[in-house]
Image: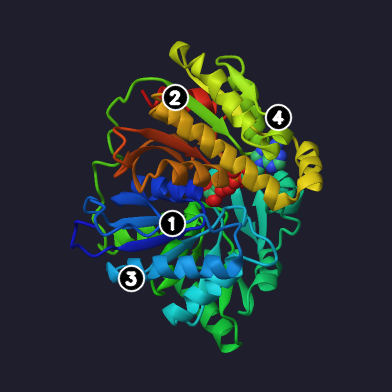
Amino acid sequence: MTSAAKLSLGCIADDYTGASDLANTLTRAGLRTVQTIGVPASDLALPEVDAVVVSLKSRSIEASLAVTRSRAAETWLRGRGASHILFKICSTFDSTDAGNIGPVMDALRADSKDSIVLVTPAFPETGRTVYQGNLFVGPVPLNESPLKDHPLNPMHDSNLVRVLARQSKTRVGLVDLATLARGADAVRAKLADLVSSGVGAAIIDAVFDRDLETIGQVALDHRLSVGASGIGLGLARALVAASRAKPDARGATLVTPVGGPAACLAGSCSQATLRQIASAEKVMPVLHLDPERVVAGKDEAQRALAWAKERLAAGPILIASSSTPAEVAALQSRHGRDAAGHAIEQAMADIAEGLVLSGVHRLVVAGGETSGAVVDRLGIPGFLVGAEISAGVPVLRAVGAGKGEMVLALKSGNFGGPEFFSDALALMP
Ligand SMILES: Nc1ncnc2c1ncn2[C@@H]1O[C@H](COP(=O)(O)OP(=O)(O)O)[C@@H](O)[C@H]1O
Ligand SMILES: O=C(O)[C@H](O)C(=O)COP(=O)(O)O
């Protein structure tokens, strides 16, 4: 980084859409924030910022590799003065019983020497709330939500104390909403009780933004916390209130118009994304990839590129691999979950690479793992945060890619309104 100023907050995100979601939240809370892809190269010119969100594609990889990569990011962030590290996970706690939230938390906690780690995925702005340790997605428990059908990390248990305990070597406890409602000192007292009984991680209830503010105050007593954009909001507000970060009135980076052809790629199979694709079909050409042909080889991606090139001059296009849960399950049963997922991610990266070579510099990508594959292939090392398209999804301006001006939107699978693709393109002129 060019700046010698110490960071107020260091963040390690386990996927790229979650990273941009958090960078958006921190920016709107007044923290000058940049999102990097991986640990930045020493020559990456970055502006003076209060917070850095290091994006990793570590949510669905082998746990020990996720630990190694997260610790490398931690070392880089601590080296730039970050006294508090937020390990950013999904607001729906996307993970398997083999990890990766538990193993990464255990490693970062050992490094931080914190006696206990505060953990909450709550993000009320997007309907993620936690009560008695149970995660709700809107009105339904996590295990009854569409997340039960996630292609890579299906969630079958809404009780996060149980879920985290299955992944972690640390004893997991709970700080309930009633304690939270009594304020920061009551939370501190409860945490001390938990520590005295051998607990090293605490799921904390949160239903409203005011709960996040209480959590943020207490979290700053520690060197590490784990959660989604909600705790990020709490931390940012606590840092500003403690004058450990000066609110930046400029807010988001003004994205100068890039122009030229625009394209959308959808690899997310979430219910929200399926609805958004259906809406997009009314206003732009949409190509549905044949997942079977994608897994079989490169021809389907080449077919998609040829289809796109015939239409780009006339306006935005959308290329989607997204299928229903039943279709996803059928493909996975034939080829394996990881193999099918990886093949489709790489096909999306092939398509993105071809689109950029064809002059596309305005790109919308739906899906966290999909975004990771695409951004890695395009070789983009970092982003500045632009306007908010919808809760949790900002316009991003690429920095350091050396490919000319490029703007992207990396949409978390479950985020965005029905007209998301049109909404995004309207803010990416
Ligand atoms: N039709 C399909 N069948 C099976 N897997 C798919 C299909 N389309 C996409 N995928 C895979 O599903 C996963 C979607 O994950 P991700 O991109 O993170 O979306 P989300 O943000 O909704 O979680 C990726 O691995 C992607 O390659
Ligand atoms: O939901 C969140 O907290 C983040 O936006 C996120 O992690 C999304 O991950 P996804 O794979 O894009 O759903």
* Residue linked to disc 1: 232
Between the residue at mark 1 and the residue at mark 4, the CA separation in whole angstroms equals: 39 Å
Mark 4 Cα-neighbour bin, 10 Å: few <14, some 14–19, many ≥20:
some
Label 3 Cα crowd, 10 Å radius (few <14 / some 14-19 / many 20+):
some
Does the CB distance between marks 1 and 4 fall below 8 Å? no
Q: Which mark is residue 78?
A: 3
Say which amino acid is labelled 4. Answer: Asp
Q: Is mark 4 within 8 Å of ligand 1?
A: no
Q: Residue at x 39, y 26 (%)?
A: 427
Q: Nearer the viewer's eye, disc 1 or disc 4?
A: 4
CB within 8 Å, label 1 to label 3: no
The disc at residue 290 is: 4
Please indicate whether residue 178 sits to the left or right of residue 254 in the image.
right
Q: Which quadrant of the frame does ligand 1 lie within?
A: top right
Q: Earlier in the sequence, mark 2 or mark 1?
A: 1
Give, as a three-letter code, the residue at label 2. Leu
Give the residue at x 57% y 75%.
201
Q: Specify few, some or many for label 2: CA neighbours under 10 Å numbering under 14, 14-19, or 20 or more.
A: many
Question: In front of the other: label 1 or label 3?
Answer: 3
First-in-chain label (3 vs 4):
3
Q: Is any part of residue 188 visible from this angle?
A: no
Quote the CA–CA distance across marks 2 and 4: 25 Å
Name the residue type under label 1: Gly
Q: Quadrant of residue 234?
A: bottom left
Classify residue 84 by image quadrant.
Answer: bottom left
**At which x and y percent is residue 162?**
71, 69
